[in-house]
Amino acid sequence: MLTPELTPAATGHHGAVARALAVGGTVAVLTTVAIIAVLDLVPAIGMINPVRRTISEHALGPNRMLFDLALLLLAAGSLAILAALVRGGLVRFRSVGAVMLGLWSAGLTVVVLFPKHNWAIGPSLSGDIHRVGSLVAFLSLPVAVLLIARRWLRDERWSGHARRARALGVLAVLSFAPIVYVLVYASAVGGAWWQVLPLGVIERVLALCEVVAVIGVGGWAIASTRPAAR
């Protein structure tokens, strides 16, 4: 059952704000998916090979502004969903889950501010910072989703949403498996790890699993703002 300190406060003005945050944040995340899909699937627009090239490669060409917009929408949308969860009483503001979801958004912002290495020129400090930001984002998101879900797994009202969120969090964790395999295999046999498997596909599967997890939590946030849930 809901504990007193976590009783949803989504009533009146607070409920309207929470709902606007939840819906707006989820729409922002879905818009990111649409933008990246266009960049990847329309060769005349994206102009990179999505099988071999990473998503961040879009930032090194004429589509940088569109790519940056997509990632900033994802970061802002995730923060809006977090704010809705806090207002709805599902997440404590200073909890580890909230901090990890904030780190996901912070990592995405770093990725935007510091483009990846342009190997036509050579390695750069910006590329090193970009790599750290990517790592922080990708690792933080599944932890955040799993921690947010764990608190409500046995709650009469939210157990269904919590179980779905947990499943998506586990899927996001499992999506790291190909990367781990590539690194272990390459270290065992030698050679460039990024040539073992198509890096672009691996990264996109990982990114898709994580974004779907965010959308799942967004749906939970929207459900928490409905009149029947108050």
Image (tube, rainbow, N blue to C red):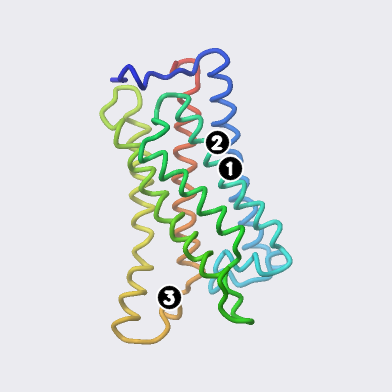
Is the C terminus in the top left, top right, bottom left or bottom right quadrant?
top left
Say above or below: 150 vs 222: below
Q: Are marks 1 and 2 in contact (CB under 8 Å)?
A: yes
Residue with the most extreme top position: 12
Residue at which label 2 appears: 80
Does residue 220 sit above or below 211 in this rendering?
above
**Closer to viewer: mark 3 or mark 1:** 1
Give whichever of discs 3 and 2 has the lower sequence position. 2
Q: Amino acid at mark 1?
A: Ala
Q: Nearer the viewer, residue 37 or 142?
A: 142
Task: State the residue lying farthest toward the front.
Answer: 125
| Residue at the spot of label 1 | 76
Which mark is in front, 3 or 2?
2
State the image coordinates of residue 116 (x, y, percent, origin top left).
Answer: 57, 69
Residue 25 x %, y %: 57, 37
- From the image, tell me which residue sits under label 3: 197
Decide: is 69 above or below 20.
below
